[in-house]
Amino acid sequence: METAILKSKEERRLLRGHLWAYRNEFSELPAMADGALVDVQSDVGRPIGRGFYQAEGGIAVRLLSRKAQDIDADFLAHRIHAAAQYRERLFPGQDVYRWVYGESDRLPGFVADRFGSVVSVQSTCAFYLNWIDDLAAAFLSHDGVKGVRFELAGQCRDFGEVAVEVPVEIDGLKLTVNLERGQKTGMFLDQRENWQAMRPFVKGAKVLDGYCYMGAWSCEAARAGAASVLGVDTSARAIEVARRNAEANGVGTVCAFENQDVTEVLKRGERYDVIFLDPPALAKTRAQVTKAQGLYQSINRDAMQAIEPGGYLVTSSCSHFLDLPAFVEVIKRAARAAQREVWILDVRGAARDHPILMSMPETAYLKNVTLRVF
């Protein structure tokens, strides 16, 4: 096995628990195939860990272990099963959850979501493609799993029974997941506990669901007793799925959906009791943060202006590069611009099947803030 040598003092962050060794931190990187296993050492020969090499991008090595242990099928299966045990404790009797959350589950760069009998896996790392058969076997050995869909390093492969559309139920909410056309692995599961948290505020309310995607927020608000819900998204396909989901949950008469930009809807002058804002990541790189702050401020200002006094705004950001303090500051500026007084009622993150690895702040990305607007 090859050994990669770090520059002087570059091991400190890794010794504190970080799992990414950047290309510019190495004094010596041997010629290796993409995805090859490699040992990382400090400049004085101290073992740092064992991981896999990435031929492209700023991250040269993702660490899998602090020890010089065998990285094989048993190693991968153990990590997959350990991740499952936590989720089964978290959601007993349920079969929809984020099964593997990358670095937090000690499988860096690897994400797996369970949707009933199917597991949907994504990674850009060639290492996992090298082990695809063993990974599939590990997932399929789990009770109730009949199929695994992989999108690994640009290649798609199915194992077992994999349908394109999978009906799922999350805490009583019925949704259809499209594994080919859906976002990421098929749908976003990170807001599932936040859907529940907003329920006390929507009974009898007129609700606007901005960036509604497949209508999960809309349907959950209607199930919690909202008088009316308008879901808005720029994707016509998403709107079609949202309508189907509303019908499946018996709230098709409460929910209406519109293929439109939420900023245009907010300019119509209508007032709402509750507004949800869950936009896609507006800052995908550090260079985009300043522009994203302006966009977040603008949309939150417009939403606050459209809320009836005493109403509620549930606003989110999934932009990793915009941290929580910066997001709260954006909300504060939006309130000033809207000339509204605001309470912060709740600050939340992703659901607990997306645990945050303390040594890697990169594993914390979702910010969800519930506000009361006067």
Image (cartoon, rainbow, N blue to C red):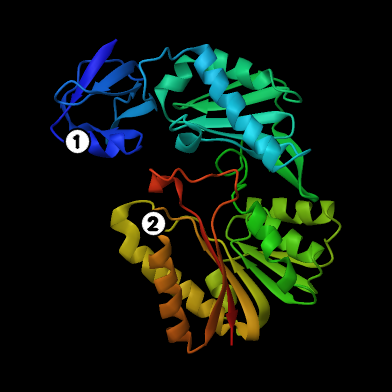
Q: Amino acid at mark 2?
A: Ala
**Residue 255 pos. (x, y %):** 77, 65
Q: In whole angstroms, how far apart are the C-alphas of marks 1 and 2? A: 28 Å
Q: Quadrant of residue 291?
A: bottom left
What is the tally of numbered marks visible in this picture? 2
Residue sitting at 38 percent across and 43 percent down?
Answer: 359
- Could you say which is closer to the camera, residue 68 or residue 102? 68
Name above or below for residue 344 compared with residue 336: above
Which image quarter holds the C terminus?
Answer: bottom right
Name above or below for residue 195 compared with residue 189: below
Which image quarter holds the N terminus?
Answer: top left
Residue sitting at 70 percent across and 25 percent down?
Answer: 162
- Could you say which is closer to the camera, residue 51 or residue 296? 51
Q: Is residue 270 visible?
A: no
Name above or below for residue 55 compared with residue 194: above
**Residue 201 pos. (x, y %):** 71, 73
Horizontal arrangement in the rendering, residue 336 relative to residue 97 (left or right): left
Residue furthest toward the top?
1
Q: Secondary structure at mark 2?
A: loop
**Residue 290 pos. (x, y %):** 31, 65
Q: Tell me if mark 1 has few (under 14), some (14-19) or many (20+) residues whose alpha carbon lies within 10 angstroms of its own.
A: some
- Could you say which is closer to the camera, residue 258 or residue 229? 229
Sequence-earlier tag: 1 or 2: 1
Q: Tell me if mark 2 has few (under 14), some (14-19) or many (20+) residues whose alpha carbon lies within 10 angstroms of its own.
A: many
Q: Quadrant of residue 167?
A: top right
Q: Which residue is mark 1?
A: 10
Horizontal arrangement in the rendering, residue 171 relative to residue 301 (left or right): right
Q: Which residue is mark 2?
A: 283
Disc 1 versus disc 2: nearer the observer: 1
Residue sitting at 75 percent across and 66 percent down?
Answer: 256
Q: Amino acid at mark 1?
A: Glu
